[in-house]
Image (cartoon, helix red, strand yellow):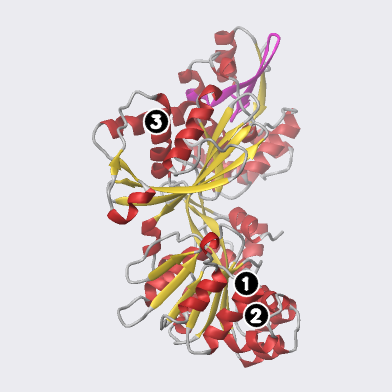
Amino acid sequence: MVQRIKKRLGEILLEANKISENDLLRALAEQKKYGEKLGQIIIRLGFLSSKEILETVSQQLHIPIVNLDKKQIPEELLKLLPEDIVKNYMVLPIERRFNVLRLAMVDPLDINAMDEVARTVKMEVEPCIVTEAEMKRALEKYYGLKTLVEETLERMKEGDELTLLKEEDEEKDEFVSVDMTQEEPVVRFVNSLLAQALNDGASDIHVEPQEKKMRVRMRIDGKLREVPSPDKKMFLPIISRIKILAGMDIAKTRVPQDGRFNIREGSKDVGLRVSTFPTIHGEKAVLRLLDKSAALYGIEKLGFLSHDEEKVKNVIKKPYGFILSTGPTGSGKSTTLYAILNYLNSPEKNIITVEDPVEYTLDGLAQAQVNPKAGLTFESGLRSILRQDPDIIMVGEIRDKETATIAIHSALTGHLVLSTLHTNDAPGAVSRLVEMGVEPFLVASSVTCVIGQRLLRKICDECKTAFHPSQPVREKLGIGPDAVLYKGTGCPACKYTGYRGRTGVYEVLVMDDDLRELVLTKLSSDVIRKMAIEKGMMLMYDDAMEKVRLGRTTLEEALNVTQED
């Protein structure tokens, strides 16, 4: 039998003392006026969050909550229900036990939906609760993404051209067209995968073997998302195809390899860096996509708040000094440095870089790639650069004392030096250099600015919706009762995540005499941080909160990125 629930949502929330009668009356009036679902109205008015509603309904009605993002629904279950029932009622079968079908539902109070499902499958129906956002992502995953790939292939057939640039032909700028109508399924799949990644703005593609299947995922806006994968019997040919494109040795399967190639779609050039790694089930391949147009970002497009942007521009106008960009891997450090170089680039300046690898190429710069086999390291490259009459030097990363010392001496002898360092925040970079063994007086004399950063997801412009936040949220952000915040409700443009694109969150430490004195006395980064705040440095947490208030991101995303409770 279908589990029938006669209570209404408003009644449930009242009984649980989650909303007042006045709140309910206001929500019902809005419902009568606009025709929205009551739960959506309660969330929009800021009375409760979707999570709070979900947990209350679950507790009151003893219906379990299911995380669809962590479930892989077997194909035989998906075939039990027609696609129109699934999409019309926002339901998904997730488990079958004898004659009982567990059904994920956005609205477990929808008796009509359960009756329809029960008639169709001729089984008892047991409801589970999921969020609307999870359901939309699941529907996109099981019923939408396959269509997207097919549409990409059709678009390619109709004339849009995807081309590959072989590494050995890069200097000649000779492109080899990839025929998307080829019959070979492996070639068709790899090409469609690349096209899908370009279309979705992915930064990485993961192709990985598992015990009984292969899995393909794309990192979009910092989050990995699974996409439809072929049968595992195609895994080895697919990996071989990727390795051939990247100029790698297909015979070597038990050692890691690196390679690269370039693709062009229309006027868009994208470099791909490929890395393979042997696992117990076979080689895993990760393809990093580097959109060369990203190098053309201006400083103003990075996401700096106005006062921090002004600080950075004032510092980089000086003809000498050591500027560091810090943060974990994937935090946008290289993009920040390229934006600065693009801002400084002019015929009057001799700008030379040594990188590992050269991610983006900029006209007017002399860029070199680290090649340890040939004896070109960061240290040796930097020594050679100093004999090239440079004005501005960019070193991809400070990895050791020797490189740090040469970079600092370069800054002290009249050069502007840019580099990156892996530290958690800006004040920690100064202490890290001292810990490497660089003399404190050299650090104090050379470092002019440290930019600490992370990347956070932006609210999708297509489904951006205003709402009045709850009192605890208003208190946390220091905003009044009439303040409005924003969130993404989920749409096809953002793959129903509510987020699309990323922006930086920063803290900009500009050195002065007082801070240099602290470095000379080898005081901890905590002491340096405290004084920097007193002198006007905004922490990444505060920067993120300001971007919440400005409607650029959500509180959840800001807290997640800045790791604050």
The span from disc 2 to disc 3 (Cα, nearest Å) is 55 Å
Q: What residue is shown with label 3?
A: 187
- As drawn, the residue found furthest toward the top would be 122
Viewer-closest of 22 and 348: 348
- Using the numbered discs, state the Cα–Cα distance from disc 1 to disc 2 in whole angstroms: 8 Å
Magenta segment includes 92:
yes
- The magenta segment: 87-110
Query: Which residue position is annotated with label 2?
Result: 533
Q: Is residue 476 left or right of residue 460?
A: right
Task: Report the amino acid beneath label 2.
Answer: Ile
The reply to whether discs 1 and 2 touch (Cβ–Cβ < 8 Å) is yes
Mark whose residue sits in front, 2 or 3: 3
Residue at (48, 34) in percent of width and height = 240
Splitting the image into 4 quarters, where does residue 405 fall? bottom right
Residue identifier under label 1: 539
Q: Position of residue 352 (x, y in %)?
A: 42, 74
Task: Give the alpha-carbon distance from disc 1 to disc 3, as whole Å.
Answer: 48 Å
Is residue 369 depicted above or below 213 in this figure? below
Secondary element type, mark 2: helix
Is label 1 or label 3 in front?
3
Image quadrant holding the C terminus, namely bottom right
Residue 501, image x, y percentages: 46, 53
Instruction: Please report the residue visible at 41 percent of the width from the left and 51 percent of the height from the top.
Output: 271
- Comparing 476 with 164, the one in front is 164
- In contact (CB < 8 Å): disc 2 and disc 3: no
Ranked by sequence position, the earlier of labels 1 and 3 is: 3
Task: Provide residue 361's location: percent of width, then percent of height.
Answer: 38, 62
Disc 3 is placed on an element classified as helix
Q: Is residue 440 magenta?
A: no
* Mark 3 neighbour class, 10 Å CA radius: few under 14, some 14 to 19, many 20 or more: some
